[in-house]
Amino acid sequence: MKTLKNAAVGEKVRVCRINGTGPLQRRMMDLGLLNGTEIFVRKVAPLGDPMAINVRGYELSLRKSEADVIVIE
């Protein structure tokens, strides 16, 4: 099981599911991170947190703890 936290810079991945529950899961879905959504990992901060991704035509910054709940393929 690979999560978005482990994705490399420049990699294109697809969302399989979101492991979070409650408000965290709802927030990810509201941001457009749904099953089958394609994500491009644009950059990661020098200390590893946060990471910038492109999803559905916009740039989004996520903390590593948030990216860890997004399962990718």
Image (cartoon, helix red, strand yellow):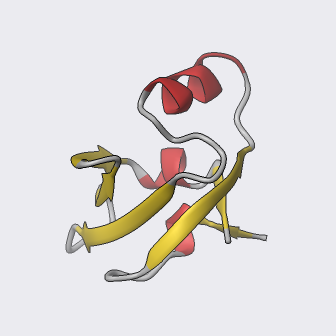
- Where residue 32 appears, as percent x and y from the top left, is 45, 35
Q: In terms of depth relative to the viewer, which is nearer, 50 or 53?
A: 53
* Quadrant of the rendering where the C terminus is positioned: bottom right
> In terms of image quadrants, where is residue 49?
bottom left
Q: Which residue is drawn at the image coordinates 20% and 74% (left, top)?
A: 46
Q: Is residue 41 above or below residue 55?
A: below
Comparing 11 with 3, the one in front is: 11
Q: How many marks?
A: 0
* Residue at 51 percent of width and 41 percent of height: 33
Nearest the camera: 44 or 26? 26
Residue 63 x/y as whole percent = 39, 48
> Dividing the picture into quarters, in which one does residue 43 lie?
bottom left
Quadrant (top left, top right, bottom left, bottom right) of the N terminus: bottom right
Who's the residue at 25% across and 49% down the image? 57
* The image quarter in which residue 29 lies: top right
Could you tell me residue 16's position as x and y percent? 71, 56
Could you say which is closer to the camera, residue 65 or residue 55? 55
Asked whether, in this view, residue 43 is left or right of residue 22, the answer is left
Q: Residue furthest top?
A: 23
Residue 56 located left or right of residue 46: right
Q: Horizontally, is 47 left or right of 41 in the view?
A: left
Question: In the picture shown, does residue 72 fall above or below 15?
Answer: below
